[in-house]
Amino acid sequence: MVSKPSLKELKSRKYLKKSDSDYSHSRLWEDSKSTKVVSLRLDERYILNYVKRPQKGPQGRYSNRVVGNTPDESYVQRGRPASKISHQLRKELSRLLTMEIDTLVVMLYQNPDYKAGKKKKHSIRLPDLSLAMQELVEELALRDERLLEHPALRRMYLPAMCRLLEIRSMYQGGEDWTQDI
């Protein structure tokens, strides 16, 4: 059964883990029993500028070993360690959905007429984030109802998440890569 976490659950330790430098997604974002494969249609420039850029720090995961209290409780998880674009997109989505609402409001005000360029499709395994995205839009509407008319939030939850990811990357990078064309 596909899990449908709320925004509060995504901010809990169940769906979030602390890495060396920041927070990232937990294994529940990748579990084949509680997630489904969805297609994210992201702007090609976002993929080139932010996902395929060299990453700081350690690359991917080193081991699938889960250390328990005793050697008998330790085990190795099945499968290959997550890496590449799918892993980075899950990490960016978890950071997007757990960031401060005030920061999201500022990001949306800085890009009032945002329109994505040519899109590229990526299939990725995710929990059903529709409930979390609905709660996020409701919280944004509580701050300012005019944000509901923002082009990034007019669509269903998956396209809206893609546009928010792209806007967040521009906001953090301090540049406007929509003018590259």
Image: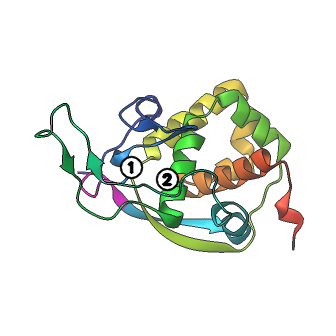
Toward the left, the furthest residue is: 72
**Label 1 Cα neighbours within 10 Å, binned few <14 / some 14-19 / many ≥20:** many
- Quarter occupied by the C terminus: bottom right
Q: How many marks?
A: 2
Q: Which residue is label 1 attached to? A: 29
Label 1, secondary structure: give it: helix
Q: Is residue 71 left or right of residue 136?
A: left
Q: Position of residue 17 (x, y in %)?
A: 43, 37
Identify the disc placed on residue 90: 2
Nearest to the observer: residue 26 or residue 135: 26
In the rendered image, which quarter is residue 102 located in? top right
Residue range highlighted in magenta:
31-36
Label 2, secondary structure: give it: helix
In the rendered image, which quarter is residue 6 located in? top left
**Label 2 Cα neighbours within 10 Å, binned few <14 / some 14-19 / many ≥20:** some
Label 2 and label 1: CA atoms lie apart by 7 Å
Q: Is residue 62 left or right of residue 19?
A: left
User: At 82% from the left edge and 48% from the top edge, which residue is drawn?
Assistant: 111
Q: Position of residue 134 (x, y in %)?
A: 51, 39
In the rendered image, which quarter is residue 118 located in? bottom right
Nearest to the observer: residue 14 or residue 116: 14
State if disc 1 and disc 2 touch (CB < 8 Å). yes
Queried whether the magenta region covers residue 11, the answer comes back as: no
| Amino acid at circle 2 | Arg
Which of the marked residues, 2 or 1, is nearer the chain's N terminus? Answer: 1
| Amino acid at circle 1 | Trp
